[in-house]
Amino acid sequence: MVRTYECDSYGHVNNAVYLNYLEVARYEFLKDINFDYPAMIKAGYGVYVARVEIDYKKPAVADDRVTIRSWPVKKGAVSGIIAQEITRGDDLLVKAKVTWAFVDSNGMPVKLPSKWDVPGLKPE
């Protein structure tokens, strides 16, 4: 549910807040596909966001109930793209593509170890 403090002076969700919504949804997506994010961090790896493309279609306002859907659209050896949509009922509010890179403890891109190269990261 959209909270009042997430809205700007126009009464719409602030554009930067959508990035928070998308981040939480990606974390939930990773959990749903059995990607063990906490274990990955503990092992010294990371998943960095390298790029975000976002199209704002319609505004969300306080008390709106929104749904966020996430799915993979591209997967390489060290990076990939997750598409996301935020909807309110049948209304499309936001479309986004988030490019991510798997990195080592120095922040350098590295091939995903098989433990974290789970099938759910690959597009169908």
Image (spheres, helix red, strand yellow):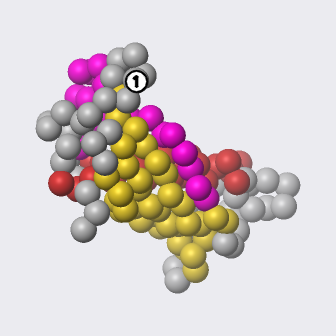
Is residue 85 one of those drawn in magenta? no
Residue 114, located in which quarter of the rendered image? top left
Q: Residue 69, located in which quarter of the rendered image?
A: bottom left
Which residue is denoted by mark 1 in the rendering? 108
Q: Nearer the viewer, residue 13 or 70?
A: 70
Residue positioned 79% across, 53% down in the render: 8
Q: Residues within 10 Å of mark 1 (few under 14, many from 20)?
A: few
Q: Quadrant of residue 106?
A: top left
Residue shown at the point (54%, 45%) measured from the top left: 51
Is residue 42 in view?
yes
What amino acid type is highlighted by mark number 1? Answer: Met
Residue at the spot 18% in from the left edge and 54% down from the top edge = 119
Residue 37 lies in the magenta stretch: yes
Q: Secondary structure at mark 1?
A: loop
Question: What x and y, as percent, mark residue 104?
Answer: 33, 22
As drawn, 59 above or below 91 = above
Horizontally, residue 103 falls left or right of residue 84, namely: left
Q: Which residues are magenta?
A: 35-54
